[in-house]
Image (spheres, rainbow, N blue to C red):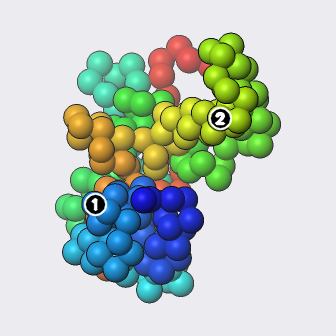
């Protein structure tokens, strides 16, 4: 069984992202050693070795959707100027900018969501569960599940990639895959989305 504790443990051991650890454990049916093997095959398990190295190179990438009514600008960082000039890195930057345009995220990661927003959402989800006549002992768990869906809607790294129609590939995994391939840290530092006439 995959638990939040087993995900956290695997993440501490490998340095891979939360969603990557969860899918690896699911694929390995909860077997930690097999999950590490799954991550290593994908090039995600050695991310921890790179965690001390800083990603200060990279590029600013802008994407304007056809029709020029909406666009996005992102800053994505890597460790070397060499990697920043590669086609793979530029393609990732384009994909992330297109993701921002298509999905209107509010934050990069869940840690950036203000406490007040989380509290308000939990209050709403708890009330919804009460109104649905759910048992009192499971209301908190239901609210947490709905909060996870909120994160996957508004936190860019947790969103399903627009290129994967199955919805299984998270944005965080796309970044992790390229980081594993090139052997460098890759960090999405910031983004801005612009829509014509929007305040």
* Disc 2 target residue: 138
Determine which quarter of the picture holds residue 161: top left
User: Crowding near pointer 2: few (<14 within 10 Å), some, many (20+)?
Assistant: few
Residue 80 in view? no
The total of numbered circles placed on residues is 2
* Disc 1 target residue: 27
Up/down of 106 relative to 38, above or below: above
Which numbered circle lies on residue 125?
A: none
Q: Residue at x 26, y 71 (%)?
A: 38
Q: Are marks 2 and 1 in contact (CB under 8 Å)?
A: no
Residue 146 in view? yes
Helix, strand or loop at disc 1?
Answer: helix
In this orientation, which residue lies closer to the viewer: 53 or 196?
53
Q: Where is residue 22 in the image (x, y as percent from the top left)?
A: 41, 59
Up/down of 144 relative to 61, above or below: above
Q: Which residue is drawn at 60% across and 33% down?
A: 142
């Amino acid at each position: 069984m995959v638990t939040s504790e087993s995900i956290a443990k695997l993440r501490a051991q490998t340095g891979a992202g939360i969603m990557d650890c969860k899918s690896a454990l699911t694929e390995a049916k909860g077997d930690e050693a097999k999950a590490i093997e799954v991550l290593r095959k994908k090039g995600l398990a050695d991310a921890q070795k790179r965690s001390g190295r800083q990603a200060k190179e990279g590029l600013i990438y802008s994407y304007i959707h056809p029709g020029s009514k909406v666009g996005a600008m992102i800053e994505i960082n890597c460790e070397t100027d060499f990697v920043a000039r590669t086609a793979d890195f530029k393609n990732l930057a384009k994909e992330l900018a297109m993701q921002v345009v298509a999905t209107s995220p509010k934050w990069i990661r869940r840690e950036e969501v203000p406490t007040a927003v989380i509290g308000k959402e939990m209050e709403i989800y708890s009330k919804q569960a009460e109104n649905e006549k759910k048992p009192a002992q499971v209301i908190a768990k239901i609210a947490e599940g709905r909060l996870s869906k909120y994160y996957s809607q508004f936190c860019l790294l947790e969103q399903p990639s627009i290129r994967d129609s199955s919805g299984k590939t998270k944005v965080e995994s796309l970044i992790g895959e390229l980081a594993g391939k090139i052997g460098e840290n890759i960090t999405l530092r910031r983004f801005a989305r612009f829509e014509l006439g929007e305040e």
